[in-house]
Amino acid sequence: MKGKVNWVSYLEKQSVEMHGMKKDNRILHKQKIYGIKPQAQKFPMMCVLSFIYVCNAKCPNCPYTNSQIRADYKDRPFMEESTFKIIADQCGEYGAWVRISGGGEPMLHPKAVELMEYAKNVGAKVGLITNGSLFTEASSTRLLEAQIDMIEFSVDAGDSKTYAKVRRGLKWDVLLRNVKRIATIRNRLKSSTKIIASSVNQVDVDIDAIAKYWEPLVDNFQKRKYLTWGINDPSKSADPAPYLPLTERIPCPFIFERLNIDSRGKVMVCGFDIAGKTDMGNIHERSIKEIWHGEEYQYYRQMHLSRRGQEIELCRNCPDWQYRSWKHNYWKIVKKAEKKRRSQVEPLDFQESEGCVKDV
């Protein structure tokens, strides 16, 4: 493609700014120069998979509950094994993340454990997002023995009453049993798997009380912004303060670090497009690397780097762009979780006991 923009941004060397945050919070969202992250120059750092479009819960904050998207994927409710393995093989070549998420509960997939084991065996990093309701001792042990990199439990509550309201169809005692069992097995096996819990910061929920409950039980707790995906009611957010000021049209970080793949193998431009309106290519026809460096992604990146992202219809209509952070992100969560995991499963040496642990 002619007029190709040099996307490369040496993020580690750039100073960062703070926006809309108190200094003592030290949460960073912006930076001086934007572009492809160094780790994503050849291949995306993460492939987020819509692994399944079936769920055993009816959470009121879920855009799939509140839309017809699952019905649109009735021809492919589960990602096929062949599709998954194409993705895993290519991610494994670059040590990229396969993040198993999407339109339902991943553990309902009949080959969920087997496919995650496969991804680890071919060199990919594996992150699982789950409601935590379907783990057995056997499946938990297999995933921990496979050393999948992170299990994120979407909990949304710190007590049974709140849980019944925000996680309809699920049982609080089952979640607690499964999280505690996985943590116990992980520590016994000295597995490298990190365990985190997350909660959406929505109205009628005490996010600080939830954090206080879960922090002792897991390696990290994530307070998630209430996102709408253009589907949910924005008034349900308990913290609508933006990370990125809309007036500045700062480039969205997602198109510079990750991509999303549905159960059919189609690549969508970003995580906002859960309905699959965009088509960047299909992994059955082109490699992920080719798609990542293709004209379709170049166009989106050029427009965002020129502060013209709002001229793209999908981006203009994205209410969640303002909640994308260049610094307060998945990679930061992984680092923090790894520090606590090490303290749980590995004895500290002298330097570590003195607080001298380096970032990983």
Image (cartoon, rainbow, N blue to C red):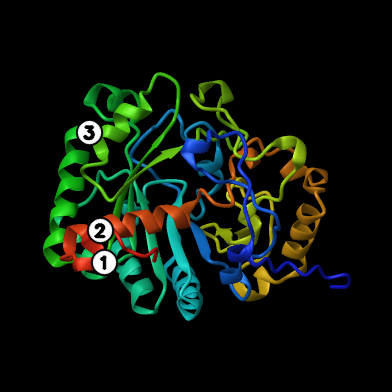
Foreground mark, 1 or 2, reads: 2
Residue 97 is left or right of residue 294, and the answer is left
Say few, some or many: other residues with alpha carbon within 10 Å of mark 3 (under 14 / 14 to 19 / 20 or more): some
Residue plotted at (30% across, 58% down): 339
Residue plotted at (22% across, 40% down): 175
User: Is residue 51 at all visible to an observer of this figure?
Assistant: no
Foreground mark, 3 or 2, reads: 2
Q: Which residue is mark 3?
A: 171
- Dot 1 and dot 2 residues touching (CB under 8 Å): yes
| Mark before the other along the chain sequence, 3 or 1 | 3
Residue plotted at (15% across, 65% down): 347
- Dot 3 and dot 2 residues touching (CB under 8 Å): no
Q: Locate residue 306, reporting x and y percent.
A: 82, 54
Q: Which residue is mark 2?
A: 341
Instruction: State the separation of the CA atoms marked 3 and 2.
Output: 27 Å
Residue 121 is left or right of residue 63, and the answer is left
Label 3 is placed on what type of residue?
Lys
In this rendering, the count of numbered labels is: 3
Specify the quadrant that holds the C terminus: bottom left
Tell me the quarter of the picture where residue 259 sits: bottom right
- Dot 3 and dot 1 residues touching (CB under 8 Å): no
Q: Locate residue 204, reporting x and y percent.
A: 40, 18
- Residue 204 badge: none
Q: Locate residue 169, reporting x and y percent.
A: 30, 31
| Mark before the other along the chain sequence, 1 or 2 | 1
User: Is residue 315 at all visible to an observer of this figure?
Assistant: yes
Instruction: State the separation of the CA atoms marked 3 and 1.
Output: 28 Å
Tell me the quarter of the picture where residue 124 sits: bottom left
- Residue 192 badge: 1
Q: Nearer the viewer, residue 86 or 345?
A: 345
| Mark before the other along the chain sequence, 3 or 2 | 3
